């Protein structure tokens, strides 16, 4: 049985639709369908059946996914064992993170790794947390940086380990001449009459902000649906809107705006995710070590 097709079947069991598997694996839906069909030809039994717009694994497919997970885990463990025995920080390390963490922490970490371990090539992909976890499960990356606000459905199955990196508070971002610019803190309830600009690149994160406003007794009036922080910042600077920003991003990009602590505090935990047992891999261990140094110097 082809190893790549087994991985595709396992991803299909997690994501349920051909299109979502295609997005995670960076291939076309037709290619996903073809890989599943070829795997069915190899094993001589149906592995999936269509249900509406999605698919459902047959009992044979579910059983094969169980075996595939064990096989893939053994291969990855063998690779980690060999890397540990060599004790050499070399090769390629693939890392992903979402924008606010990426801008604040990844560049200095990559530079430190390059200076200390010239034989290690670190590559970075900017991905939202749920996409990072999907890429980790699909073996497209080795380490994912995620948060516990955007991963509302919970952290992944036991094949992935989580390592707490830091806690990051959210802040209200206001124009300098805003009526609350002189206050130390601002409650969400006091902002019920404001217009909001939100970075909607992560629908889950946007949902957290909207949910917090509703808990404070109001539905936010959103006049800016933005796919990046630059436009959010421009709308606030022009006096059109206010927003909520993670503390990590605010420290780097506040500029001529005003950042105020929210009452009550909204805190997100930021975690490193990697496949179980792979912290022993010298390259992953080196990345974690250098990243924690950068976190300590930035947030300590």
Image (cartoon, rainbow, N blue to C red):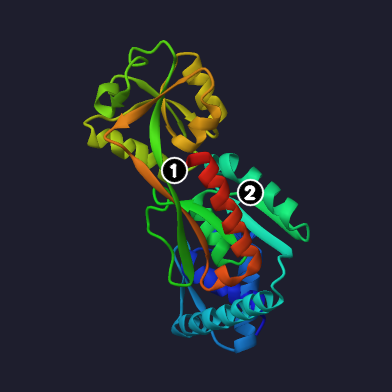
What percent of the width, then of the height, locates residue 244? Answer: 40, 31
What percent of the width, then of the height, locates residue 55? Answer: 48, 69
Mark on residue 189?
none
Q: Quadrant of residue 108?
A: top right
What residue did someone put label 2 on?
Answer: 109
- Is residue 222 left or right of 17 when viewed as pictured? left
Labels 2 & 1 near each other (Cβ < 8 A):
no
Q: Is residue 140 visible?
A: no
- Is residue 295 left or right of 216 when viewed as pictured? right
Residue 178 sits above or below residue 162 on the image: above
Tell which tag, 2 or 1, sits nearer the viewer. Answer: 2
What residue did someone put label 1 on?
Answer: 203
Residue 112 sits above or below residue 50 on the image: above
Q: Earlier in the sequence, mark 2 or mark 1?
A: 2
239 or 163, which lies in front? Answer: 163
Q: Is residue 238 visible?
A: yes
Could you tell me which residue is drawn at 47 percent across and 42 percent down? 300
Cα distance, mark 2 to mark 1? 28 Å
Q: Is the residue marked by circle 2 packed among few (<14), some (14-19), or many (20+) residues within 10 Å?
A: many
Local SS, label 2: helix
Quarter of the image with the N terminus in it: bottom right
Residue 116 sits above or below residue 137 on the image: above
């Amino acid at each position: 049985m082809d190893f790549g097709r087994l991985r595709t079947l396992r991803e299909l069991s997690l994501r349920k639709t051909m299109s979502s598997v295609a997005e995670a694996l960076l291939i076309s839906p037709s290619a996903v369908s073809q890989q599943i069909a070829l795997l069915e030809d190899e094993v001589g039994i149906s592995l999936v059946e269509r249900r509406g717009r999605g698919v459902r694994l047959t009992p044979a497919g579910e059983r094969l996914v169980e075996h595939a997970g064990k096989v893939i885990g053994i291969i990855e463990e063998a690779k980690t064992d060999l890397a540990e025995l060599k004790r050499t920080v070399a090769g390629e390390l693939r890392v992903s993170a979402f924008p606010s963490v990426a801008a604040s922490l990844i560049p200095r970490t990559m530079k430190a790794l390059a200076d200390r371990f010239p034989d290690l090539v670190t590559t970075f992909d900017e991905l939202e947390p749920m996409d990072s976890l999907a890429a980790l499960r699909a073996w497209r990356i080795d380490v994912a940086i995620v948060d516990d606000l955007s991963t509302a459905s919970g952290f992944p199955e036991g094949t992935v380990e989580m390592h707490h990196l830091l806690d990051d508070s959210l802040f209200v971002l206001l124009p300098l001449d805003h009526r609350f610019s002189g206050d130390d803190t601002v409650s969400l309830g006091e902002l019920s009459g404001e217009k909001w600009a939100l970075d909607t690149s992560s629908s889950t994160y946007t949902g957290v902000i909207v949910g917090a406003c509703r808990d404070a007794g109001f539905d936010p009036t959103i006049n800016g649906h933005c796919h990046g922080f630059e436009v959010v910042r421009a709308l606030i600077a022009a006096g059109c809107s206010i927003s909520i920003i993670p503390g990590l991003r605010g420290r780097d990009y506040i500029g001529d705006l005003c950042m105020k602590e929210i009452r009550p505090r909204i805190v997100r935990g930021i975690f490193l995710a990697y496949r179980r047992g792979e912290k022993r891999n010298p390259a992953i261990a080196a990345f974690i070590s250098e990243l924690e140094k950068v976190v300590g110097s930035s947030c300590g």
